[in-house]
Every structure is written in structure tokens, then in C-alpha cells.
Amino acid sequence: MSNSSITPGISATDSADKLAMDANSLNELRRNAKQNTPESIKATAKQFEALFVNMMLKSMREAAPQNGPFDNEQTKTFTSMMDQQLSQKIASRGIGLADMLEKQMLGNSALSYTSKHPVTSSLVDPTSINQQASSLKSANPGLSSSQAQAKAFQSKLADVAESTSQSTGIPAKFMLGQAALESGWGKHEIVAANGQPSHNIFGIKAGSSWKGKVVTAMTTEYVNGVATKKLEKFRAYDNYGDAFKDYAQLLQGNARYKNVIANAKDAYGFAHGLQKAGYATDPEYANKIMKVITKSILA
């Protein structure tokens, strides 16, 4: 993809070296940010830091006495040039602002560039769970919205759940029950800021060991039994098959979950095994999973 829209003839990498020195460069910052690539985001963050440093130095100069015996237009011009050079040096070494901005912007756009094949938005994907639910509801007026959503969810994920069951030994309906609880039957799937779906229907967080795509979302954690809203990073996948595969690897490869698979012979053992292993902080997590599995998941 060409970066010519940043500045004609200047690439995103070049732009990173051409630091912004005045407020007029804000237009270039806007053009840069719209590229939504790692290079343009890095350039934008560096430019903004340089602009911030330069404006800070300018404010400090303006706050100092201006009518000394050696003050004239030439000295002011020279001082301004020195401030620009100083701000360049400071920004090139970094004061931490650019790194912070870059991480924030990368987090918000992670799904846009880390995959060679961008995920299709669930808003226009005719095979998405929510679209299937709408179609079912239209074709069967007697179904409630929640019933249509549950049927669409299970129809969409039944095959991949069964395939994962064969490799893990965990009954497909148990996994569907947990996924339904975590995602609100797919209706509240975690999405990126630009609306792209993460396909993360198991609510798996992106820890330091995760090297894949991420998406940031608000979640509820229970601290000493009290529900608390927190902003967390979650794993993101290209499709639901990858989500189930990663979920299986998590349960099979992490020692803390070994008893979950061993006790997955019934819904009680599976649900309470997950809660005991610390999969979620909700004190009612096991009971909620059991309720979904026994009352809502199709046999």
C-alpha cells in the first residue's frame, strides 16, 4: 500500500524523521494517522511528541522576560531555531510520550494490520451470528429474539465445537455453554474500536506470552466479591475455528486446567473445574455455565 497520502514523495518512515515543528504540521499528523499502519502510527507519535516539546519550549521562552538589552529580532530567530533543534534532539531520544501514544494507537488498530487477510466486519457479514439470528427471527415470528440468537449461535459453532471435542475430550455442549456465557450467545462478542470482530467468544485475555492480535475492551472483574469495571486486552482471531483451537490449547497445555479436562464427564465437574482453576473471577461463574448447559444448549 502506498504512503503517498502522508506527504507527496515522503514515506511513513521518512516522515518519522521529519519531526513536526509547528502547529501547521497538525494537518500532516492527521493525514499520517489515517494511514493506520505501524509505520504511519509510529511517525505520527514521534511527530506529536516533537510538536509537544517544541510548544513547551516556546511557552517557557514566552514566560521569560523579553526586553533584555540583547533581545532583538535576530536573537529571537536564533533562539527559535535553537529551540527547534533542541526539541528534535529531545524527541529523537524520547520522553516517553511517543511510545505511549504509539502503543495506544496500535492497540486500537491492531486488527487492521496484523492480518494479511483482514477480518470481515460482522455488520456486513451475512453469515455472522447476529445476522443469522435476525434471519431466523424473520422466518419464524414465533421465536423470541433470545431463542433466535441461541439457535443461530449453536448452528454457527456446532461443527467447530464438535471437532474441538474430538481433540480434547470435552463435550461440545460444555464448550458451547461456556462460549455462550462469555459472549452473550455471540451478541456481545468483543470487537475492536473500528467494529471488527475478534471472534474471541471464550473471553481469553492477551497476556505477555500472547504474540497474536489483540483488542482492548471493558470487562467486569470481581475483586473481593465486588464487581469492578476494567479495561483489558483480549486475544483476537481470524475466525471462530482459531478461537476454539486456541481455547483447546489453553486447557490442554496449561497445568492449572488439567483437572478441568479430567472432570469434564459432567457439567458440574467441567464448570466447577473452570472456576476452581481461576478461569474467571465471578463467584457464580460455575453455576452460570451449568445453567446455560443444562437449560439452553441443544443436545
Image (cartoon, grey):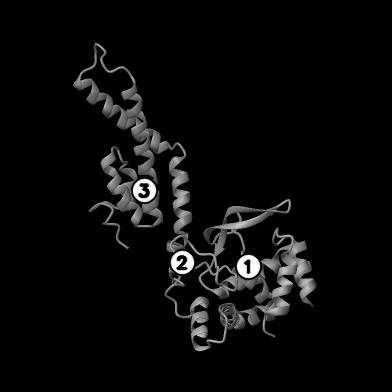
From mark 1 to mark 2, how far is it between C-alphas? Answer: 18 Å
Which amino acid is tagged 2? Answer: Gln
Which amino acid is tagged 1? Answer: Glu
Contact flag, marks 3 and 1 (Cβ < 8 Å): no
Instruction: Name, please, the residue furthest toward the top.
Output: 69
The disc at residue 196 is: 2
Q: What element carries label 1?
A: helix
Q: Nearer the viewer, residue 122 or 113?
A: 122
Residue 128: % across, % down: 49, 77
Place residue 182 in its image quadrant.
Answer: bottom right
Residue 281: % across, % down: 70, 58
Whether residue 239 sits left or right of residue 168 in the image: it is: left
Q: Which of 129 and 204 is in front in this view?
A: 129
Place residue 82 in its image quadrant.
Answer: top left
Instruction: Name, please, the residue furthest toward the bottom.
Output: 139
Which amino acid is tagged 3? Answer: Ala
Q: Which of 70 and 93 is in front in this view?
A: 70
Q: In the image, is residue 267 above or below residue 13?
A: below
Does label 3 or label 2 sit earlier along the sequence? 3
Q: Of the residues tagged 1 and 2, which is closer to the observer?
A: 1
Q: Is mark 2 on a helix, strand or loop?
A: loop
Residue 238: % across, % down: 50, 70
Residue behind mark 1: 182
The disc at residue 43 is: 3
Dot 1 alpha-carbon crowd within 10 angstroms: few under 14, some 14 to 19, many 20 or more: many
Residue at 74% in and 60% down: 283
Does label 3 or label 1 sit earlier along the sequence? 3
Residue at 46% in and 72% down: 122
